[in-house]
Image (spheres, grey):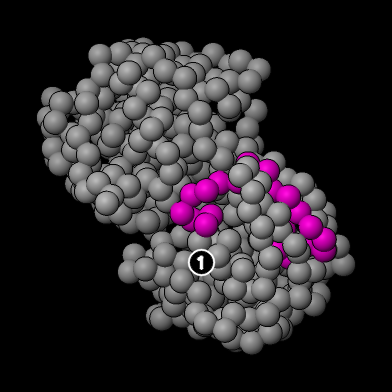
Amino acid sequence: MSETIRTIQPAKSVDAEIQLPPSKSYTNRALIAAALADGTSIIHNPSRSDDSVLLSDALRKFGITINEDEDRLEIIGSNGNLKAPSKEIFVGNAGTAMRFLASFACLAEGETILTGDEQMNKRPIKDLVDALKSNVIKCSSQNGFPPVRIHGGNFVGGRISVDGSISSQFVSSILLASPYAKRTVTLHVNGKLSSMPYVDMTLHVMRSFGAIIDTVEMKTFTINNQQKYIGHDFIIEPDASSATYFLGAAAITNGRVTITNLTSESLQGDIQFLSILSDMGCTVINHPESIEIHGGKLHGIEVDMNEMPDCVPTLAVVAAFAKGATTIKNIAHVRHKETDRLDALSKELTKIGVRVELSEDELVIHPQPLRGAVIETYDDHRIAMSFAVAGLRVDGIEIINPMCVTKSFPNFWEEFQKLDD
């Protein structure tokens, strides 16, 4: 039986070595490219998160063969020849799976229906559906939200425009499928592209599988449809987003944490969380194979987090232990995650005694004396993990539905236990 509430034990000072899980963001991009490729691919060290498992299961329903080994996946590519699933595909609350499969399904003859859980079906997909419809693809949503119906087999290509301000996943979705369009795709991004490092990650995966892409200032992408993906071996990096909770733990306890399998050379945007903690008063030491962080006297900062949305919950919690206010700006897109994270952070931080100012795209944290509370997680892994960090300093923090962490970090609680040993 899964535990329904978890009490966090305060730690006097943290001194731990942490092993991160593989990146689900990289795993999910590599899964799509490998499924479309000509030939067999091996994904080494894949994520076993709920999101990646849901995507693998969905790809199998398109006729893709995926063989699992202990630390690798063997994917027999389709060379872009996909069959539409006979039944609707359920992706839970996996945003990448829903968005990436929408464009992927455009390549499969017949009708695909993509649906998710109650929370997923409240997450916007209108801008992606509109972009696909503009490319003569017959698809529809429920007033801009899943479920989504796609009649595939006619991904024309040519010029496509998509709004990237709500989610960079809309851009990544079209990019990943574009080598298989009938014509070369020129993708124009309208609005401000949120979470740009995730699009960088998509381009990195596509190019490593052989795609040819020209980019102009991350606003216009030209994807050659003559150069398809070629099956190959792809090694998944450890997940930088998952590191933030342990880095934050060192920061607020004046402790020390070493992340043993990640370096500052990572291509993931969330590695920049290190420089934010450094700006707040921590000491960061880079080693050839690891990262070490020492907590210090924390002070508030003002920071634009548009490119690091997944770090916002951790930063908001760390800011509660700093001297002076912290202003987190340009984060409206954080409202469209597993839950409205800005609203959730405001409510739960207030519960533990923090004074919070919330606007449409900004969060201001004013530290105050803190107290224990029962934390509602909204079935959101990042809310659960970030407030667990607060419990290392504040007695009486209890996390409701703690196993929602399996969405991205199945063994989070085992690693977290090391902080209190």
Magenta-span inclusion, residue 40: yes
Q: Quadrant of residue 352?
A: top left
Residue 147 percent across, percent down from the top left? 44, 77
Badge 1 density bin: few <14, some 14–19, many ≥20, Cα 10 Å = many
Give the residue type that dot 1 points to.
Met
- Placement of the C terminus among the 4 image quadrants: top left
Residue 223 percent across, percent down from the top left? 78, 62
Residue 165 percent across, percent down from the top left? 50, 58
Q: Nearer the viewer, residue 3 or 209?
A: 3
How many marks the image carries: the answer is 1
Q: Which residue is mark 1?
A: 98
Q: Nearer the viewer, residue 35 or 124?
A: 35
Using the rendered image of the protein, determine whether residue 343 is visible from the camera's viewpoint. Answer: yes
Q: Secondary structure beneath disc 1? A: helix
Q: Nearer the viewer, residue 108 or 314?
A: 108
Magenta-span inclusion, residue 190: no
Q: Residue at x 68, y 68 (%)?
A: 64
Residue 151 percent across, percent down from the top left? 61, 85
Does residue 146 appear to the left or right of 158 in the view shown? left
Q: Which residues are magenta?
A: 32-53
